[in-house]
Image (tube, rainbow, N blue to C red):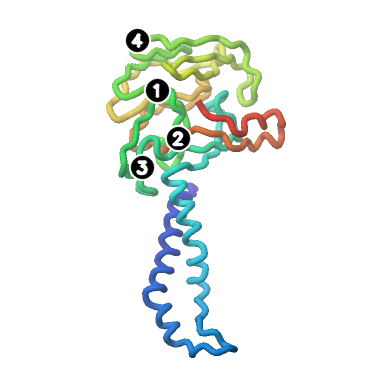
Amino acid sequence: MHFDFEALLTLATAFTGIVWLVDALWFAKRRRAATPAETAEAPAKPRDPILVDYSKSFFPVILLVLLLRSFLAEPFHIPSSSMVPTLLVGDFILVNKYDYGIRLPVLHTKIISVGEPKRGDVVVFRYPGDTSVDYIKRIVGLPGDHIVYRNKTLYINGVMMQKDALGAYSGPDADGAELNREHLGDVVHQTLTIPGQYSREGEWTVPEGEYFAMGDNRDNSSDSRYWGFVPEQNLVGKAFFIWMNIDAFKDSSLWHRVGNTIH
C-alpha cells in the first residue's frame, strides 16, 4: 500500500488552517460575547475548544514543512543498489525541488519554469509505470539525443563516452563488480559493471519533453533501457546531498558519506 505523505501533509495544512480561520471569523467572537465581564478572580478571555487550540498550534508548523518540502528540498531514502557506487542502500538524501521548476504539491503542475535537467544530473522522478513510486537515476539522454548502449559502453549522438577502468569494486552492495570512471561531458562520475553479466543493450532516440535515465550500477538497474523514457512532468527534483546513512551505525567506515554532495 502506497503512503502519500505529501497528500496527507497538504490535507492536514488545509484542515488546520480552515478550522483556525472559521473560528477566528465566527465562533471566537461569539465566545467573547458570551464571556462574563473580567474580574480580578475571573479573567475575561475565553478558552478555545481543544480542536481550535491544536489547529492554531500545528498549522504554522505544518505549513512551514509543506512549503519547505514542496518548493525547496525533500528528503528521500535509497532502498536499492541501482545507483551504486554513487548512492548506497541506506543513504538518506536531499532533493532540490526548484531546479526543474516550481510545482504545486499533490497536483505536480508546474507553475514557474526555472530550468531543465542537464546531462549527468542525478534525479528523482515518478516512475512512468506507476507514478506512486519514486525512482532515482542519472540523466544520460536529453530530448533529441540518440542513445546507444553496447558492450557495457555508452554512446551519445555517435560519440563514445570515455570510460576509464579503475579496477575491482571493494565497496558494499555490488560484489564482483568492476569500477569505472565515466565522462558525460562536464560530469565525471563512477559506474559499476559486472563481467559476463547480462545487461540490456540497444539504441534509442529520446522524444521531445522526455529524458533517458540509467543507473550507475549498470548491470543491476531497472531504467530507461527496460521501461522507456522519463516524461518531464514526472520529474521531482535533483539529488544534491547525503545527510545520513543508516548502515553507518553497523559499519563505521560509512560515516564519511554523511555530508557528501552528489554528482
Image marks 3 and 4: residues in contact by CB distance under 8 Å: no
Q: Which residue is the site of mark 4? A: 158
Question: Left of 63 or right of it: where is 114?
Answer: left
79 lies left or right of 15: right
Q: Are marks 2 and 3 in contact (CB under 8 Å)?
A: no
Which residue in the protein does label 2 denote?
124
Numbered label tally: 4
| Residue at horizontal 51 percent and vertical 38 percent from the top | 94
Residue drawn 42% across and 40% down?
Answer: 97
Distance between mark 1 and mark 2 Cα atoms:
14 Å
* Mark 2: secondary structure: strand
Comparing labels 1 and 2, the label whose residue is closer to the camera: 1
Q: Earlier in the sequence, mark 3 or mark 1?
A: 3
Res 40 quadrant in image: bottom right
For the residues bearing labels 2 and 4, Cβ distance under 8 angstroms: no
> Closer to the N terminus: mark 3 or mark 4?
3
- Compared to residue 58, the image places residue 186 above or below, namely above
- For residue 119, the mark is 1
Number of other residues with Cα within 10 Å of mark 2, as a class: few under 14, some 14 to 19, many 20 or more: many
Sequence-wise, which precedes: disc 2 or disc 3?
Answer: 3
Residue type marked 2: Val
The first of marks 1 and 2 along the sequence is: 1
Label 4 amino acid?
A: Gly
> Image point 48% across, 47% down: which residue?
2
Can you tell which mark lies on residue 102? Answer: 3
SS for tag 1? loop
Question: Foreground mark, 3 or 4?
Answer: 3
| Residue 82 percent across, percent down from the top left | 53, 27
Q: Marks 3 and 1, how far apart in space? A: 20 Å
Q: Which amino acid type is marked by label 1? A: Arg
Q: Secondary structure at mark 4?
A: loop
Callout 4 crowding tier (Cα within 10 Å): few <14, some 14–19, many ≥20: few
